[in-house]
Structures are given as structure tokens and as C-alpha cells.
Image (tube, rainbow, N blue to C red):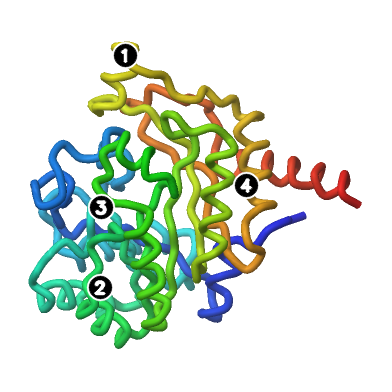
Amino acid sequence: MKYYRDFSDFLAGHFDCKMQKLSVNAGFPCPNRDGSKGRGGCTYCNNASFSPAYTRGAKSITAQIEEGKRFFARKYPDMRYLAYFQSYTSTNSSDLGRLMDMYHEALDVEGVDGVIIGTRPDCMPEALLDSLRKLPWVMIEYGAESSHDVTLARINRCHTWADTVDAVRRTADAGIACGLHLINGLPGEDEDMMLATVEAVNELPVDVVKFHQLQLLRGTRMAAEVEKGLYDIPRFTPESYAGLCARLATRLRKDIAIERFVSQSPPELLIYPRWGLKNYQFTDKVNKELGRIVLKTE
């Protein structure tokens, strides 16, 4: 039994067939690396941890999508697709025409019915929103990570929660679907702070949230700082993290869809946690915890 609205429920309200996201790397720079916002990037970030192999290299957007389609079409020949501009900050360009050309290139690929654009809440100009609202279907996914400015400063995000609030409200006013990306277990945050972030999200016109556990990755500033003993991070077991996710889900506004609870980084990059669970296996644990919570309240 499912105890929350998931991403497939959300998509079913917009499309009449099964949809699959295909990641696209359009070569956008990160403003937290190129100096326009900051230097060094977020302390936890190694972009290779979430970029599929088919998006790497100098392939065109069309070539990346076609390769992704071939991978999924073997199992689901009737699948339709959403182009997911995932890597770094996919609106980080002052050239509006260039941005829109890339989104249109994705939509011109046979079988692609919409685009999902991952970006920062401080990188969404009003002129771009005005253009995006004219696309057949679009959702903006903002990397919010936390509602606590002290945490955002600690991980070198170089934006504030107020930036997220502003971006989400302007996106909703433009009639565009909106998602938020949130990280559980950031340094210095306890459960009360994570629950407070959920309550802050509840006050916004958000359609989808994407949770995942903090992952300590090789080659990141955070990994170096933890190794030096400057601070530690929460050390969840699968069971304790599933319990946390269940409690977060019960606090989240019921019309907001949850896309996921965990993320999987390549084993060669991952230091912690190394749970050895598939995403669906972990989701089963969360649903069992939610079932227990529901039984206690009945």
C-alpha cells in the first residue's frame, strides 16, 4: 500500500501514458564554481555522481536523448519521455535565445513531450520564465537543499531560502510546475530542522519534492573536512533513515508528490552511506514505516 502521492501520480495528472525522464547535459557552467556566485562549488558536490554515462562527452542534446531512448525502449517500447536538463545549473546563461534553442531541440526529438529543468533558485530571470511558459510542458526543479540559511552558508550554496521562496512563487505565478530538491542529513542539522524545512515547503506552491540522503563523495570539500575531523555528518542506518523519511512524509502537504527518498552515486565515488539497497527496496522500507505510523494513529 502507498501512503503518499508519488511522482507517477503527479505525471498521471499531465500525461495519459507512462513517462520516463532522460537526463541531458547541456554543458552549462555552475555559478557557484565560475565566480559569478561563488568559487569551489557546494561542499558536498561531485557532479559525476549524478550524471549518466550517456550524457558525458561532447554529444549533442539530440544524441544524448536518442541514446537514452534506446536504453529504455528495449524494455518499454511504448514509453514517452521528458528531457531532464540535470547537470549543474541548466539556466545559467545570459543568452536567452541559446537556452530556448536547447530546450526546443530536446522537444523536437520524437517521443519527447516535455522538459524538466534543474537549476538554482537564484538563476531564474523573469524573461526566461515568460519564454518557458510557452513550451508544451515544462517543470522547473530548484535545488533548495534546506530552508536554513545557516546550513546553506555552511555548505557554500551561495543562495538563501528567501531566494527559493521568490523563485517558487514566481514560477507558480507563471503557471509552470515546480519541484524542490532537498537533502536530509546536512552538517549541523537535526531532525527538528529537517522537519522545519518540510513545514516551510508546505507554505509554498510546490508540486513535487525530491529528498535524498546526504552522500559523502570522494573529491569533495566536505569529504576532506570530515576526514580532517572539522565536523561529522549524521550516520544513518537504512532503518533510521527510513523512519526519518516516513516522519517527513507525514508532515508534507498531501497534494505535494514525493519523487524519491534516496539517491545512488557510483560506488567508486561513494564513501558513505554504502547501504547496498536499490531505490525500490528503500522505498518499501519507508512504506512499512508509514504503515506503522498510520496504524498507531487509527
Tell me, yes or no, if residue 275 can be seen here.
yes
Q: Which is in the foreground here, disc 3 or disc 4?
A: 4
Q: Could you give the CA–CA distance between mark 4 and mark 1, rounded to whole angstroms? A: 29 Å
* Residue name at image x 31 percent, y 78 percent: 110
Task: Give the quarter of the image for residue 69.
Answer: bottom left
Where residue 155 is drawn, which disc sits there?
none
Of callouts 4 and 1, which one flags the residue occurring earlier in the amino acid sequence?
1
Residue on which the image places disc 2: 106
Of callouts 1 and 3, which one flags the residue occurring earlier in the amino acid sequence?
3
Residue on which the image places disc 4: 248
* Residue name at image x 25 percent, y 51 percent: 54
Task: Say whether residue 199 is left or right of residue 42.
Answer: right
Q: Could you give the CA–CA distance between mark 3 and mark 2, rounded to whole angstroms? A: 15 Å
Given the current orientation, which residue lies at the most extreme right position? 298
Q: Could you give the CA–CA distance between mark 1 and mark 2, rounded to whole angstroms? A: 42 Å
Where residue 227 is drawn, which disc sits there?
1
Secondary structure at badge 4 equals helix
Q: Amino acid at mark 1?
A: Glu
Q: Could you give the CA–CA distance between mark 3 and mark 4, rounded to whole angstroms? A: 27 Å
> Where 154 sits versus 274, above or below?
below
Residue on which the image places disc 3: 87
